[in-house]
Amino acid sequence: MNKKTSKNINIDYCIANSYLDNVKLYRKSDAIIALLVMIYTIIISFLSGFIFSVLEVKEPFSLIVGIAFLFVTNIPLYILFMKRKQKLTSIGIHLINWKASITMGLIFILISFFLFRGLIVGLINKWNFNSFDMIVLSLLLVFMSALFEDLIMIGYIQTRLYGLIKGDILAVVAGSVIFTFIHLPIMLWLPWRNKVILIMFYMMIHFLLNSIYRIVQSIIPVTALHFSLNYSSLGLFWQYPGDGINSSKSLIVLIFLVIMLILIFKKFSPKMRSRMP
């Protein structure tokens, strides 16, 4: 790698290359900066968890506070991209192979309708819909939360970890641990048994999201799955959602279907890359 390339590590980042070929471009400095972003994100995460749980922020202020925290969390990312002149493609923001990305995303959303407390589950159980305003506001907040989280965790931190951790499996495990740790505020007041279950859940979700990203290197299908999973599991379509489909069963079905879909798209990913400019 020549001197000019090492100064701006992302000038060679190309979606036509495989995921592993691209992440090999990152250096220790990229990984260290990513870890600093992680620390900042964890601090903001704990602060937001404190405000929502202890101060009991109510609607509509919870939406305003939630969106404000999302923007504050992503400020370092914006600054880094401006200062280091990094490409947005390196965190999955692009429209290359957009048809495949959107198709995969729509399939994930459709799958979520049938799981947890999703749309189809509620219709079958004849639950009452939430108010239109509440559905729109919750859709906006959950979508933005998933998008910003995926940009930081999957698009930025996970890819830059390879500058410090050269082993693929070890890098993914480290990313899963970081992803889980960022969600600790959700678990603070839960019994230990529930904490262990959630830790395993978040590590598995990170593995799935990262596996999806590695195929098309696009944030679109990643956020589609993350957003629809969160929305269905919370049952936000419904005013008084019941238990719905058991969370464990839903998760098993989800993992199976997502892995099958990943394998199908992975089979065609070399052909998709060959058609890229």
Image (spheres, helix red, strand yellow):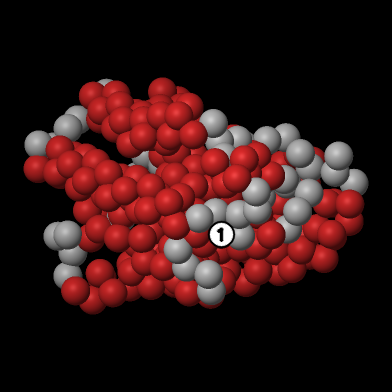
Front one among 249 and 268: 268
Residue 9 seen from this side: no
Residue name at image x 31 percent, y 54 percent = 182
- Name which quarter of the figure residue 262 lies in: bottom right
Q: Is residue 50 above or below residue 161?
A: above
In this rendering, position of residue 5 left or right of residue 132: right
Q: Residue type at mark 1?
A: Asn
- Name which quarter of the figure residue 213 lies in: bottom right
Residue 184 seen from this side: yes
Residue name at image x 22 percent, y 53 percent = 185
**Residue at the far left in the pictured view:** 54
Q: Secondary structure at mark 1?
A: helix
Residue name at image x 84 percent, y 59 percent = 270
- Name which quarter of the figure residue 186 lies in: bottom left
In this rendering, position of residue 127 left or right of residue 102: left
Q: Is residue 122 above or below residue 61?
A: below
| Residue 62 locus on image (x, y percent) | 25, 30
Q: Is residue 193 above or below residue 190?
A: below
| Residue 46 locus on image (x, y percent) | 20, 47
On the image, numbered disc 1 is attached to which residue?
A: 210
Residue name at image x 18 percent, y 42 percent = 47
| Residue 128 locus on image (x, y percent) | 43, 40
